[in-house]
Image: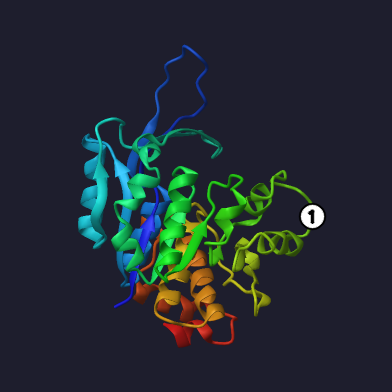
């Protein structure tokens, strides 16, 4: 079985609904409090496990009650937590989300123990990373940690995937270790130091990133599919059209689906088709973890939506 390692983040999301947003000094009553696991690295690792992959997560949590949310999740989902390190210097990452009756929100995020991840932290997992078929990283952890994961993975012969979310400018030397870069359209622009809504064409910007050393740039474009620009590809892989319920977990689902198919040795465009289907599937369910499909669910979803990618998804799964 193919082995994948995700070097990324874990955080607990705490959500409460309120009829109106409070002002400073005001106490108001809310409702429908909920909390659950999150963090892009964690989400992608769970997505891979649900697709039947042998996956390990490298991350840092605190020595507190919220850390148990992570450890219990990985035990239930089958994610290896050998390198989920507990450190009492910082609390487990957490985000507080307040939603009003119109669906608007504000979020206060403390990445906590995730910020303790540096080069030395990642190097402790170097044997596992180097032995992986695919190595993934996100940018909810320090850039140094993500870049180290790409460097070790590349040196070990793994296929490397960097999901640059949330986007931040990266040092030029980092790109040479990235086989597949998977930004969305706003992240693509931020990576190049541009405003998120810069009007420059997406393909032109993807080419600019390729010129910095990235192997293949895959720009996720929601219902418009994914732009693929690499040594042998310059195309758009379509996405199934669905009635959207919640887009929150779509990016994580895409990366999990894409990486799972790639790890099994499927062709690039077929692997991206799995990713677009997984992302579309995630949009049909509320919440991130509930939206991550199992292998069977993704195959059934493909059949139901009559995916328009020349049958590549059905052939893959």
Marks counted in the figure total 1
Q: Is residue 34 left or right of residue 221?
A: left
Residue drawn 46% across the image and 51% down it: 146
User: Is residue 153 visible in the rendered structure shown here?
Assistant: yes
Horizontal and vertical percent position of residue 185: 66, 56
Q: Quadrant of the N terminus?
A: bottom left
In the rendered image of this protein, does residue 316 appear above or below residue 138? below
* Dot 1 alpha-carbon crowd within 10 angstroms: few under 14, some 14 to 19, many 20 or more: few
For the residue pair 191 and 221, the one nearer the viewer reads as 191
Horizontal and vertical percent position of residue 125: 30, 55
Q: Is residue 211 left or right of residue 248?
A: right
Colouring scheme applied when the structure was drawn = rainbow
User: Is residue 287 visible in the rendered structure shown here?
Assistant: no
Q: Quadrant of the C terminus?
A: bottom left
Residue drawn 53% across the image and 50% down it: 165
Residue bearing mark 1:
200
Horizontal and vertical percent position of residue 194: 72, 45
Residue drawn 68% across the image and 76% down it: 235
For the residue pair 311 and 202, the one nearer the viewer reads as 202
In the rendered image of this protein, does residue 244 appear above or below residue 122? below
Residue drawn 31% across the image and 36% down it: 92
Horizontal and vertical percent position of residue 275: 50, 70
- Classify mark 1: helix, strand or loop: loop
């Amino acid at each position: 079985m193919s082995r994948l390692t995700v070097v990324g983040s874990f955080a607990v999301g705490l959500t409460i609904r309120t009829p109106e947003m409070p002002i400073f000094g005001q106490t108001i009553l809310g409702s429908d409090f909920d909390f659950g696991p999150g963090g892009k690295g964690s989400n992608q690792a769970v997505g891979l496990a649900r697709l039947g992959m042998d996956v390990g997560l490298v991350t840092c949590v605190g020595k507190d009650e919220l850390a148990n949310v992570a450890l219990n999740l990985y035990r239930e989902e089958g994610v290896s937590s050998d390198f989920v390190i507990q450190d009492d210097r910082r609390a487990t990452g957490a985000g507080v989300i307040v939603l009003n009756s119109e669906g608007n929100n504000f979020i206060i995020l403390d990445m906590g123990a995730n910020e303790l991840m540096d080069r030395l932290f990642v190097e402790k997992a170097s044997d596992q990373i180097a032995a992986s078929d695919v190595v993934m990283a996100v940018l909810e952890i320090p850039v140094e940690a993500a870049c180290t994961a790409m460097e070790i993975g590349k040196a070990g012969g793994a296929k490397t995937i960097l999901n640059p979310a949330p986007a931040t400018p990266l040092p030029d030397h980092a790109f040479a270790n990235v086989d597949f870069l998977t930004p969305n359209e706003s992240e693509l622009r931020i990576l190049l130091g541009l405003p998120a809504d810069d009007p420059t064409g997406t393909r032109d910007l993807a080419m600019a990133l390729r010129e910095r050393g990235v192997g293949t740039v895959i720009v996720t474009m929601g219902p418009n599919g994914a732009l693929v620009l690499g040594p042998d590809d310059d195309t758009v892989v379509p996405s199934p059209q669905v009635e959207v319920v919640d887009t929150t977990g779509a990016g994580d689902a895409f990366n999990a689906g894409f990486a799972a198919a790639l790890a099994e040795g499927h062709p690039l465009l077929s692997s991206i088709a799995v990713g677009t289907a997984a992302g579309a599937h995630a949009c049909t369910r509320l919440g991130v973890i509930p939206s991550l499909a199992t292998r069977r669910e993704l195959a059934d979803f493909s059949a139901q939506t009559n995916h328009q990618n020349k049958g590549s998804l059905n052939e893959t799964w």
